[in-house]
Image (cartoon, rainbow, N blue to C red):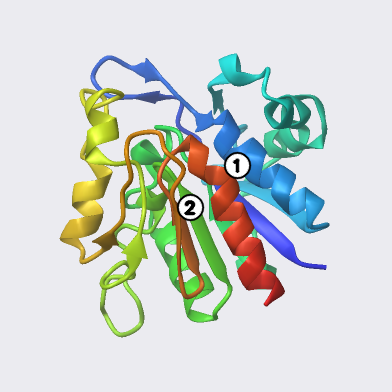
Amino acid sequence: MKTILIIVSNANTIGPNNRRTGTFLPEVAHPYAEFSAANYEIHFASLTGDTPYLDALNLADDPQNLAFLTGKGWADMQKAVKLSDVDVSKYDAVFVPGGLAPMVDMPENPLLKQVIKETYERHAVVGAVCHGPVSLLNVKLSDGSYLVNGKNIASFTNEEEENYAKGDVPFELETALVNQGAIFHGVAPWGANSVADGNMVTGQNPASAKGVAEKMIRILEA
């Protein structure tokens, strides 16, 4: 049985106005549904081991979001273990959902960067969606190059950020990824867009989360 580690942020506010945030519900619920349907074992880790926060609970009328909230998903996510207590080498894939929260605690976290590097270099699958690809930023491979350099990547776009959280985020994710050499792929705001490059899969926004999981599963089953 394949095993997936979902790594979530512990942040619950962002920016000068202390905007409330967390993991964006569909970006964890939709992949969780896909991984569950594939009969994968799914575990959660957070950076601090404290209970993570959810954002976008107003989207709970979506069947997969509701199933996550009322079923095993949210119950398991609340029991997320501290990343430093996890042997990530046992997992076939790691996945980082978005929401604004990762922009707070994931740009520089040294352990997270190490985990992403090691997962990628042992050819396990690395996936992230929306603001989740901030987890890939500042990751340096064994040869000293940036992980995203020369890779086809999608994330929340500058155009999307303009009308969403420009005043809250510490920097624009698209710009930061491009500055480290990413070959960036964006579509019109809020459109579904997921991109696989080798054993790395990224997606643009909430509508892209399902596609990221599907592409990760395709790689894992290949």
Residue 49 makes an appearance in the image: yes
Q: Amino acid at mark 1?
A: Gly
Counting from the top left corner in percent of width and height, residue 146 is at: 27, 71
Q: Is residue 52 visible?
A: no
The secondary structure type at the circle numbered 2 is strand
Q: Is residue 198 above or below residue 209?
A: below
Residue 30 as seen in the image, left or right of residue 115: right
* Residue designated by label 1: 49
Q: CA distance from mark 1 to mark 2?
A: 20 Å
Q: Residue at x 33, y 34 (%)?
A: 189
Residue 87 percent across, percent down from the top left: 65, 66
Percent coordinates x, y for residue 124 in the rendering: 58, 74
Name the residue located 73 percent from the left edge and 26 percent from the top edge: 63
Q: Nearer the viewer, residue 198 or 193?
A: 193
Residue under label 2 = 128
| In the depicted structure, whether residue 25 falls above or below residue 59 | below
Mark nearest the camera among 1 and 2 is: 2
Q: Please give the name of the residue rendered at 27% of the width and 24% of the height, measured from the top-left corner.
A: 15
Q: Is residue 19 left or right of residue 116?
A: left
Q: Residue 81 location, x and y as percent?
A: 66, 47
Q: Against 206, is 146 above or below? A: below
Secondary structure beneath dot 1 equals: loop
Is 105 placed left or right of 119 in the picture?
left
User: In the visual, does 189 lie left or right of 67?
Assistant: left
